[in-house]
Image (cartoon, rainbow, N blue to C red):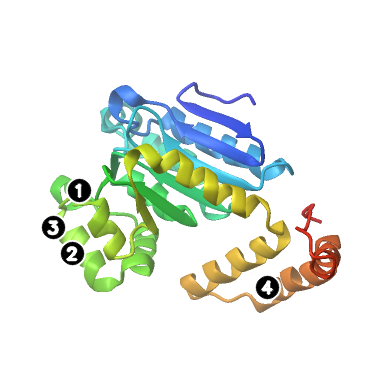
Amino acid sequence: MQLSTEKIIARREGAVGELVFNNPEKRNALSLEMWVGIAEALEAFEADPNVRAIVLKGAGGAFISGADISQFEERRSTAEKAADYNAITDKAWRALAHAGKPVIAAIEGFCIGGGLAVAMKADIRIAARNATFGVPAARLGLAYPVESIRDLINLVGPSQAKWILLTGRRIDAEIAHRIGLVDEVVETKNLEDAVRGLTATIAENAPLSMLAAKETVNQIAQGRIDKDKLARLATQCIESADFAEGRRAFMEKRPPRFQGK
């Protein structure tokens, strides 16, 4: 797979597409080139029928420590440059938000600011015990993006969202799990195995059914229900070869072999 930057590694391991943030010297702070790579990698995974799940992870013991602020002077110092920067990052955000396949964030170390925003776009978040979360926008004089705040509220509720945003404090994995920011906490050494087990389970399930479920949950969470689209997805499931395979497998008492069509 050809990407625009070596700081984003995209690879397929069996049925799993892995997107690795590879800027360890800066704890995987996201540069503009990395945002380009994120969009390209996700588009490639979406187009590959062999990919059943996507894993987001960081290299070097961190997930993402935030945006690469050192680039702001060069990349965002004028309105024109800021518009170009935002056009590139917006494409990556759209790819994250509209990924049709299940996305799992495997989080260790720093998951801060923009890194947390990326993790919240995943469908499931598994955190290592050494993971640290926070939104330092209030300490930088910045406004956290509206969509990221909506994602945060959907996960932890308005009160906890305000606590995170107004204090700018960092929280550990146990607190993140208790308030609903992450779905599971595992020992750091067991993170890879936990993610592998989860993706193995997901890869066995019917892709069209998971797509319908994910789209339905997302629409409900966003408060915008497109009944026609959801009806089309439901009809697609009913008319699929996978539904017929699921029925046969149930009657024959064997695991189904889904093809995503």
Q: Residue at x 31, y 28 (%)?
A: 71
Q: Secondary structure at mark 1?
A: loop
According to the picture, the residue beneath numbered tag 1 turns out to be: 136
According to the picture, the residue beneath numbered tag 3 turns out to be: 167
Q: Secondary structure at mark 2?
A: helix
Q: Secondary structure at mark 3?
A: helix
Q: Which circle's residue, 2 or 4, is located before the other in the chain?
A: 2
Are dots 3 and 4 in contact, CB under 8 Å?
Answer: no
Left or right of residue 149, residue 213 in this image: right
According to the picture, the residue beneath numbered tag 4 turns out to be: 230
Q: CA distance from mark 2 to mark 3?
A: 6 Å
Asked which quadrant contains residue 49, the reply is top right
State the residue lying farthest toward the front. Answer: 253
According to the picture, the residue beneath numbered tag 2 turns out to be: 163
Q: Which circle's residue, 3 or 4, is located before the other in the chain?
A: 3
| Total numbered circles | 4
Are dots 2 and 3 in contact, CB under 8 Å?
Answer: yes
